[in-house]
């Protein structure tokens, strides 16, 4: 069995096929797909999609790319909807939240501050409800680590991890897991492949980030959650262990960090 810890199954790229994609993944042994929200407008969409398939669960949060259009009222809505969702067994985390210092528009000083404000306020909601966080970390590893250290949510995942060994260690010390997916399937991705091969096995979870970050054999096409076993096979090869070991370890890691699954 496998878990896709980060998949935007509600994305428009899937057209009307989101449920069919979940079923296809299930046939490949993907027993759970975590669907993060990106803005308050799509909270009901991810909740309903997760409920409509056998192997779906969801997170609620405001993605850094959506912060420019968000207001403080969205944080109030988030807190209210998280409180309401605590009784829903498909609701598993706060996310997708984080900091993106790569996209130029998001790195202007005022927008940097707004991103940090939204990130910190969402970390506090996660802490208050003892929920893990699904984090988008792009050119912002050390700033993210600083705020997580200060606010201390109940763990989470640094998704699509692309930092240094030292930064990885920082997350691990805070009780976080690191998400690996399609990026490690490219032979030129030397640093990500070295991290995937050498980090402690109990720190690693698998993800697709579908429809994005397609693995090498799909690129530049649309990624999908049924790719998880083949992505897992790449991790097995990099680490010199069996595919079964990767499946059982990464599934156990995902369940440990997302205990509501
Ligand atoms: Zn994402």
Image: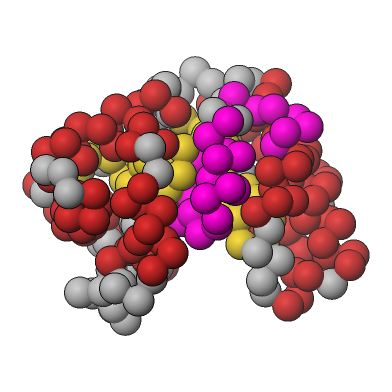
Colouring rule applied to residues: secondary structure
Seen in the image, is 121 located left or right of residue 181?
right
Residue 7: image location, x then y, percent = 38, 53
Residue 175 visible within the image: yes
Question: Which residue corresponds to the image point at 84% horizontal and 72% vertical from the top-left?
Answer: 108
Residue 164: image location, x then y, percent = 55, 55
Give the vertical position of 90 relative to 190 (above or below).
above
Question: Which residue corresponds to the image point at 64% horizontal and 21% vertical from the top-left?
Answer: 129
Question: Which residue corresponds to the image point at 58% horizontal and 47% vertical from the top-left?
Answer: 166
Q: Quadrant of residue 43?
A: top right
Q: Nearer the viewer, residue 105 or 232?
A: 232
Seen in the image, is 227 located left or right of residue 208?
left
Residue 50 visible within the image: no
Give the vertical position of 103 relative to 116 (above or below).
below
Residue 241: image location, x then y, percent = 16, 44
Q: Nearer the viewer, residue 73 or 3?
A: 3
Residue 242: image location, x then y, percent = 11, 43
Seen in the image, is 31 located left or right of residue 181?
left
- Position of the N terminus, as image quadrant, is top left
Q: Nearer the viewer, residue 197 or 108?
A: 197
Question: Which residue corresponds to the image point at 73% horizontal and 46% vertical from the top-left?
Answer: 119
Q: Nearer the viewer, residue 241 or 112?
A: 241
Q: Range of the magenta residues?
A: 148-173
- Position of the C terminus, as image quadrant, is top left
Farthest residue, direction right: 110
Give the vertical position of 122 relative to 227 (above or below).
above
Q: Is residue 157 magenta?
A: yes
The image shows a total of numbered marks equal to 0
């Amino acid at each position: 069995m496998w878990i896709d810890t980060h998949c935007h199954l509600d994305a428009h790229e899937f057209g009307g096929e989101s449920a069919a994609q979940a079923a296809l993944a299930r046939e490949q042994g993907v027993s759970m797909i975590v669907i993060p929200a990106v803005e308050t407008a799509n909270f009901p969409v991810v909740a309903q999609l997760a409920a409509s398939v056998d192997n779906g669960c969801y997170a609620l949060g405001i993605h850094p790319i959506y912060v420019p259009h968000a207001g403080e009222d969205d944080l109030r809505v988030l807190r209210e909807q998280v409180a309401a969702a605590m009784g829903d067994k498909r609701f598993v985390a706060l996310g997708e939240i984080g900091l993106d210092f790569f996209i130029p528009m998001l790195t202007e000083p005022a927008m940097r501050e707004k991103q940090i404000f939204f990130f910190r306020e969402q970390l506090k909601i996660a802490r208050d409800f003892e929920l893990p966080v699904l984090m988008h970390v792009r050119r912002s590893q050390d700033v993210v680590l600083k705020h997580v250290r200060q606010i201390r949510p109940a763990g989470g995942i640094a998704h699509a991890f692309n930092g240094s060994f030292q930064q990885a260690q920082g997350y691990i010390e805070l009780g976080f897991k690191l998400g690996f997916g399609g990026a490690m399937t490219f032979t030129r991705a030397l640093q990500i492949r070295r991290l995937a091969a050498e980090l402690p096995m109990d720190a690693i979870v698998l993800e697709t980030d579908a429809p994005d970050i397609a693995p090498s054999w799909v690129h530049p096409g649309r990624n999908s959650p049924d790719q998880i076993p083949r992505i897992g096979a790449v991790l097995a090869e990099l680490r010199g262990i069996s595919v079964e070991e990767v499946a059982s370890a990464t599934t156990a890691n995902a369940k440990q960090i997302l205990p509501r699954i």
